Image (tube, rainbow, N blue to C red):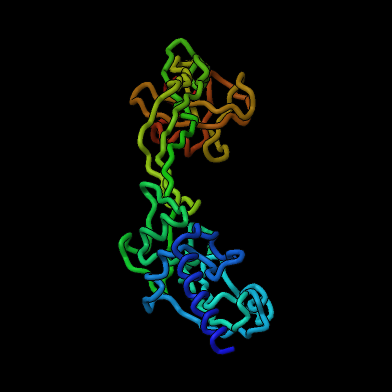
Amino acid sequence: MREIIGILIIVSIVIFSGITRSQPKPNNGKLATGLAILGVEDEKESEAKTTLFDEETYYGPSRLLSAEEFISQSKIIIYPEDLVKTFPDPRFGLGFVMKITRALPVKVIDGNEEKLFRTFSQDVKSFLAEKGIELGDKDRISSEIDAKLSKETTIKIVRVEETEVKIKKIIEYKTEYQDDPNLEKGKEQVARQGSAGEKELAYLVRRENGQEVSRDLKTTKILKEPEEKIILRGTKEVVYGTGIATWFGAPAMTAAHNSLPRGTMVEVTNLSNGKKVAVKVIGGGILGKAIIDLSPDAFSQLAPLGTGVITVKVTKP
């Protein structure tokens, strides 16, 4: 019996060696049907010997004739990237040793998304290439591209996007006032209605992980020039009359006038000295030759009350 067992072991070694050399590479994390090797490609074996990767050893009983069955019954979690080997082949019914080399877990925070990867790569550059993670020209990464991976490695990628954004804005028109000698003083007339213009602002907008972080104005283009609104202001003097002004005991800054409506504002100019005063007409009833009768305070701004009578011009303010 011992001789038979010895022969089986030798045969198992020979078969195992031949399989590992000649069989195609199995899919990551899947048990290779009928083989003693499970997991990832053979070239990872030498890498797996480093302390970077954790190793676990299990002993399977002779009653179990497949690694799959042992893993299922033992409730061992196998990740797709892990390297798994058994020796001798469980099908011989001699019992076997299972060795699991765990792929290194690497956390990647890519923009606003967090993922956990497992790898046998030993540096950031080869890891990114293995996982198909591409970096844009402006993207930022928290690690040096040639940095070695470790069990505490977390790679943060800031996705940077720069785009040109064009915004149209209204240019408000201005209002210009012009004197018009043909228009009565105090009156205004719109000579031209204004119209707003339009301009286009081009911004370079920078977003990091989808959030806008800056907006720089690059160019301004005038699409339409604004047109000023023109309002004419009358400067033509409206004369209500020239004649004598007197004063009477009226309320402050008021006057009596026989023809102007109550409430009319007038400007009274002393023709002898050029002094002016503005008063409100509160009624008529002037007896005599005066064209306007002023309140004492208004009269005193044109001449002393003792003067009694002055020659004035009454106009529209």
Q: Position of residue 127 (x, y in %)?
A: 41, 60
Q: Position of residue 92 (x, y in %)?
A: 61, 77
Residue most toward the top?
182
At horizontal 49% and vertical 78% (from top left) the residue drawn is: 10
* Position above or below: 213 against 103: above
Does residue 146 appear anywhere in the picture? yes
Looking at this view, is 63 or 226 the one in front? 63
- From the viewer's perspective, tell me whether residue 265 is left or right of residue 142: right
* Position above or below: 210 against 298: below
Q: Position of residue 84 (x, y in %)?
A: 52, 72
* Position above or below: 193 against 92: above
Residue most toward the bottom?
2
Q: Position of residue 87 (x, y in %)?
A: 52, 77
At horizontal 42% and vertical 12% (from top left) the residue drawn is: 181
- From the viewer's perspective, tell me whether residue 262 is left or right of residue 22: right
At horizontal 44% and vertical 31% (from top left) the residue drawn is: 277
Count up the numbered dots: 0
Looking at this view, is 121 or 48 the one in front? 48
Which image quarter holds the N terminus?
bottom right
Looking at this view, is 66 or 4 the one in front? 4
Looking at this view, is 189 or 13 the one in front? 13
At horizontal 46% and vertical 62% (from top left) the residue drawn is: 41
Does residue 116 appear anywhere in the picture? no
